[in-house]
Amino acid sequence: MTIDNFTVRPMRRSELDLVIDWAAVEGWNPGTYDAECFYQADQCGFFVGELNNELVASISAVAYSKQFAVIGFYIVKPQFRGQGFGMKMWRAAMEYLGTERNISLDGVIAQQENYQKSGFQIAYRHIRYQAVGGGVVPDGVVELKTVPFEQLVAYDQKLFPAEREQFLRLWIKQPNSVAYGVVSDGHIVGYGVIRQSHAGFRIGPLNSDNEQIADQLLLALLAFGCDALVFLDVPSSNSEAIKLAQRYGMKPVSEVARMYNKEIPNLPIKNRVFAVTSLEVG
């Protein structure tokens, strides 16, 4: 088997379900119903590598705008590694995204040096914390569906490098999930989502104007995951977010590095992003 037998092509929607299973095997613990949300963010931005009619590799390159994109799902099945297939996937993704976009990814420790050789710089780390869900929803927290959707889109855009209306519309309505918000004087001041994952539940995003609001939302989200493992990926640059996780006895279990190939976006990560939406599409 040589690289000459290897073909990179666009991923079909049904194949993304398989790739998410690969991610689960890798220990990434993707959401059970993530596939449709991810795919609709950019249907042209998912690729598979095929060897003799067998799918052996994947990568996503979600272009949110002409200025910003996210790479994820960079996987080569273990028995096919070390043969150059991963580099062909990488080149296909980068060719699709072009040279003008600022590209983001979350690199595992073993690959960070390789990404740096490709021009990516580390902005901060995402630390995955684990807890056991339970408790009750505190006063002042409402279901996000009661908040005007355009308010949510506008709020989210202040905390993400691009507008992602289509993604959010699906993300907050996944099966076996819940999305909560906090509203003050008629305006959203924080929101969070918890969704079923391959193991337990994942929280993401958890965004708020301050730590007190984040605390309310976190308690509400933990209540939904009653007696189950709950995970969230916390930006290391937000010291209040780390303190919040520690306050409720959460333990760090893994980490990756948020990296960019151009500039690090000027976003209020340090005081408003308490958990990232996902490590696959930003």
Image (cartoon, rainbow, N blue to C red):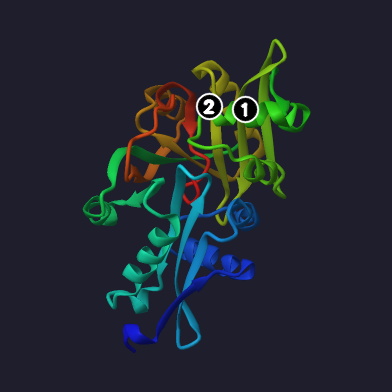
User: Label 2 to label 1, Cα distance in Å?
Assistant: 7 Å
> Going by the image, does 257 lie left or right of 146?
left
Snapshot quadrant of residue 142: top right
Density class for disc 2 (Cα within 10 Å; few <14, some 14-19, many ≥20) is some
On the image, the x and y values in percent for residue 152 come to 66, 29
Residue at x 71% of width, y 48% of height: 176
> Going by the image, does 5 lie left or right of 197?
left
On the image, the x and y values in percent for residue 258 come to 36, 42
**For numbered disc 1, what is the local secondary structure?**
helix
> Going by the image, does 261 lie left or right of 23?
left
Q: Nearer the viewer, residue 229 or 162?
A: 162
Of all residues, the one furthest to the top in this rendering is: 185
Snapshot quadrant of residue 220: top right
Residue that numbered label 1 is attached to: 154
Disc 2 to disc 1: CB gap under 8 Å: yes
Q: Give the amino acid type for the residue marked by disc 1 in the picture.
A: Ala
Q: Give the amino acid type for the residue marked by disc 2 in the picture.
A: Lys
Q: Nearer the viewer, residue 19 or 149?
A: 149
**For numbered disc 2, what is the local secondary structure?**
loop
Q: Is residue 126 above or below residue 99?
A: above
Query: Is residue 207 visible in the rendered structure shown here?
Result: yes
Residue at x 69% of width, y 46% of height: 170
Residue at x 57% of width, y 19% of height: 213
What is the quadrant of the N terminus in the image?
A: bottom left
Residue that numbered label 2 is attached to: 158
